[in-house]
Image (cartoon, rainbow, N blue to C red):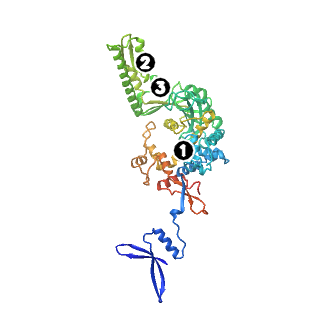
Amino acid sequence: MYVARVPNRGSPPAVLLRESYREGGKVKNRTLANLSRWPEDKVEALAAVLKGERPRPNLHDSFDIVRSLPHGHVAAVLGALRDLGLEELIDPVPSRQRDVVVAMIVASVIEPSSKLACARGLRSETATSSLGEVLSLGSADEDDLYEAMDWVRLRQERIENALAARHLSEGTLVLYDVSSAAFEGRTCPLGARGHAKDGVRGRLQIVYGVLATKEGVPVAIEVFAGNTGDPKTVATQVTTLKERFGLSHVVLVGDRGMLTKARLEADVVPAELDFITALRAPSIKALVEAGAIQLSLFDQVDLVEITHPDYPGERLVACKNPLLAEERTRKRLELLAATEAELDKIATAVTRERRPLRGQDKIGLAVGKVINARKMAKHFVIEITEDSFTYRRDEDKIAAEAALDGIYVLRTSVEQSVLAHDEVVSSYKALAYVERVFRGFNTDLDIRPIRHRSEERVRAHVFLRMLSYYVTFFMERALAPILFKDDDHEAAEAARTSPVAPAVRSTRALKKTSTKRTADHLPVHSFETLLGDLATIAANRVQPIQADVPAFTVVTTPTPIQRRALELLGVSHRLGYV
């Protein structure tokens, strides 16, 4: 028997099952069945059997994909973490606790969440990615995560010392910044009301201080009670630098609200640390009034170095940023106009015929509430009696303040031979960058929300967040060619007309932004959307129908942009499944 395909005029060929036989010494054929309605794969299988071949299996029906777990983003982050040697920094000896800590760091980079959600994402039954499977944590629960947090908290100091040894050296710049994060609950002793730098007012908070390199690489983080003022955190950082990190000569860079005169005299100078900070507005005004800073100098230059007897052995670098001056002038005029609009309402209330506002105390209370709300009291001359209220702008004070718009003065103990004045400006501007970076910790998906009850768990939570940012920092640096980030820093720096001028983006970065394409014609991503793209690389668990064939895992083949991302990171998309 055989399968024959017989031409059929005007229609597809007829598929017939035929048999050959001999009759009277002749070979004849007869049709046994019409197979034209059979599926093609079934016809091919029958034809193979009739030829004595093994039937080709129907692959579609031979396998089941029993589970698909997002894997590409896990491979990227875990591979980058391992390439940084972070596993060995956490603990040289492999252990389940170390794996759980690594899992929490990776999960925080991918999608920060509560410890309960993280544990659910690791467990085999409720896994949201391949992370638990790759790290063999399919049975982990939240108690395992809390135990690992306690475990890594005991090792925080040693890990930070190792990071400092890797990234800090004698004579280097060390940036220090302080921020706050709102706290959930009322039982943790660290939770207290204080100045809310994250914009969440009226709630308990914690304060944390970060030590970082001038590039923004975090090396240490410390948590303080929520009502701790910025200057009070300086002493512990001096101890960290001198005693823990063993650095005898570093330059501590901090803002003027933190490295105050008192802290410099009590903590920084006695420790023989150099510093870069800035003067407050009253100190700048005093220098101008004393003639130490001639405002006319800024008509020709945008920065000038001076000395003054009030700052012996120190250098003062006075700078003027025209763009900052314009912004402050604009903001002042808007605040003045908004305040006058409210004051006019009070003036109308005092002069109206029906139920006018009367009483010097009542009028004064209403006026005080308005002029203090926007801190504009210093710019108005107010006259209040029992039945009248008038106001006018104090033009002399406004003009005096406007003359200092855009002017800031940096204060440093670093000698000219070590750091030129333009380098002093660049170093301080680097602090502004780090301030933006670490205040980014406070988004609802990062440090917040904080739901832990004990001090040590809160400290461990914040430390793990620092480690996750450490991984993110180096991933973004490696992936910069396919991100919207500027990856041509030399060109960007060359385009700046002055250290005082705002940073500008390179031509290459501007082209990426406008075309949404890289030089290789690949789509440009943000870091978050790239992780989402990589997550579509799945680890597919395939179960053959035949009982004697074991299940196996097939990882999705990367797209061109995914392949490029993994190449930049030096990571295989099959990580964990090789």
User: For the residue marked with disc 2, what is the amino acid?
Assistant: Gly
Q: Which residue is mark 1?
A: 109
Q: Position of residue 469 (x, y in %)?
A: 55, 42
Q: Position of residue 87 (x, y in %)?
A: 62, 47
Distance in Å between CA atoms under marks 1 and 2: 48 Å
User: For the residue marked with disc 3, what is the amino acid?
Assistant: Ala
Give the camera-side residue of 285 and 300. Answer: 285
Element type at marker 2? helix
Distance in Å between CA atoms under marks 3 and 2: 24 Å
Residue 269 is tagged as none
Residue 368 is tagged as 2
Residue 323 in view (yes/no): yes
Residue 272 in view (yes/no): no
Give the camera-side residue of 545 and 257. Answer: 545
User: For the residue marked with disc 1, what is the amino acid?
Assistant: Val
Q: Residues within 10 Å of mark 3 (few under 14, many from 20)?
A: some
Give the camera-side residue of 366 and 29. Answer: 29
